[in-house]
Amino acid sequence: MRYDYIVVGAGLFGAVFAREAAETGKKVLVIDRRDHPAGNIHTEDRDGILIHRYGAHIFHTSDEEVWRYVNRFASFNRFTNAPLARYRGRLYHLPFNMNTFYSLWGTATPREALERIEEQRREIKGEPRNLEEQAIALVGRDVYETLIRGYTEKQWGRPCTELPASIIRRLPVRLTYDNNYFNDLYQGIPREGYTRMVERMLEGVEVRLNTPWDPEMRSLTDKIVYTGSIDGWFEGRLGQLEYRSLRFETEKLEIRDYQGNAVINDTNAETPYTRIIEHKHFAFDQQEVMDTPCTWITREYPMKWEQGGEPYYTVNDEKNSVLYSRYRRLAEEDPQVIFGGRLGLYRYLDMDDTVRAALDTARKELGRDERKAPGRRKR
Ligand code: UDP
C-alpha cells in the first residue's frame, strides 16, 4: 500500500490536515502511538461526565473561518471561561479586572483602580526585560505577588525574572467587571467532547492507533506530516529542545459539586499543583450532567520534562529559539516531511491557532483554492 500522506499524530493539527487531504482525494494514513485519537484534547466519559484527560481545553476564536470549520464536526455549548484564583485561602476573579481589584484594594471604580495600578507601575522604568517586570508594568506589584508569581514559577519551574515577558502578554487586563477570560468573539466546548469532534474529522480516513512512527514507513509514502517534536524527529542531533511537562491527578468524589466552578487556580507557591478542574462544569447547560450525584476533579501538577516523558509546553526562551531555528533549517533540507502542531512548530498554539495552521498548511500543500475566508480576526 502506498500513501500520498502519512500523518504522524492524530491530534487536532493532524486530524484537520488529514481531513483536508482526504477531501481532495489523497490517500492518507494517520498513525498515533496512543490508544486514542485527539492528542492532548482527548476527552473521555466517566459517569456521564466528559473528562479533559490532559488538562482543561476551552475553544475560543475570533477567526470566522476556523469557527465555522470546527462547527462542521461538533456542536458547541456556550461555555465561558471565568476561572478563579485562590491565594492564601482567599478567592479572586480572573482575568485581572475590576472584581479582582475590588477584592484586593476595595477600589470600586475604574479611576480608583487605575490610580493604584499607575502608582505601582512606576517601579518599572523602560521596556520590561522579563516576565516579572512585564507583569508589574501591566498590573502592579500587588497583583503580581498575589496572583502571578507563585503560579508562574510553579508552571515554568524557574523564577519570573528568568522568563520571557511574552508569556504574560496573553492575559487580558480590564477595567470593567467582566470575568470572561478570553476576548474572542466565539467560545465554547463541544457537547460530545473533543474526541468525538476529532473522530468526525477522521471519518473515512485510515487511522492506526497504538502505532509509533517508524522511519521504515518513509518508503510507504510520498510525504509525511509530523506533529511530534521536531528535535525528536532528528533524534536530538543538534541538542535537545526544552519542554515543560504536567502530571494529572484525577479523582472521583461522591458529592454533587466540589468547587462550584470549572477551573480554580492555586497561586500560592507552596501548593504543589497550579489548578483544580471540576469537569462537570464544562457541561454547565446539561442538567443531567450537573445532577449526577458524583463529580470528577483533576489536580494539575507542573513537572520537569525529561526524555521519554510527555511534552506539553515549549520553552520559548532565547536559547531554545536559537536551537529551534537550527532544526528548522535542517527540516528545510528534507522535502518529504512537513512539521505541524505545538511540538512540530515549537510554539504555544491555542486550538484555534492549530486549526488555522493546519488549514493553511493543507492549502499550501494541496494547492486547494482558498475558500472564502472572511474576517480572519485574531487577537
Ligand atoms: N497566569 C498567572 N496566574 C494565573 C493564571 C495565569 O500568573 O492565575 C500567567 C502565568 O504566567 C502563566 C500564563 O499566565 O504562565 C498563562 O497561563 P494559563 O494558565 O492561562 O495558560 P494555559 O496553561 O492555560 O495555556
Image (cartoon, rainbow, N blue to C red):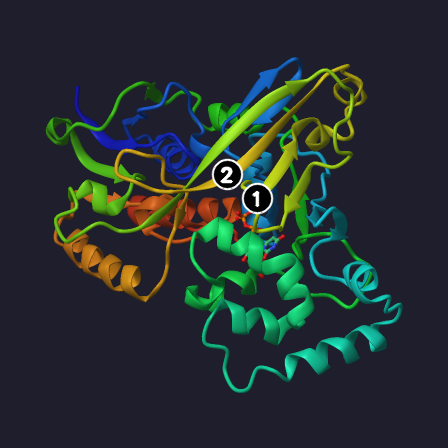
Q: Depth check: 142 or 102 in front?
A: 142
Q: Depth check: 221 or 121 in front?
A: 121
Label 1 packing within 10 angstroms: few (<14), some (14-19), many (20+)? many
237 vs 293, left or right, is left
Vertical placement of residue 111 versus 45, above or below: below
Say which quadrant the N terminus sits in: top left
120 vs 309, left or right, is right
On the question of residue 368 being in view, the answer is: no
Query: The residue under label 1 is which amino acid type?
Result: Thr
**What label sits on residue 301 in the rendered view?**
2
**Residue under label 1:** 274
Among numbered discs 1 and 2, the one appearing first in the sequence: 1
- Which residue is rendered at x = 20% and y = 41% of the image? 233
Say which quadrant the C terminus sits in: bottom right
- Which residue is rendered at x = 28% and y = 43% of the image? 229
317 vs 131, left or right, is left
- Which residue is rendered at x = 60% and y = 72% of the image? 136
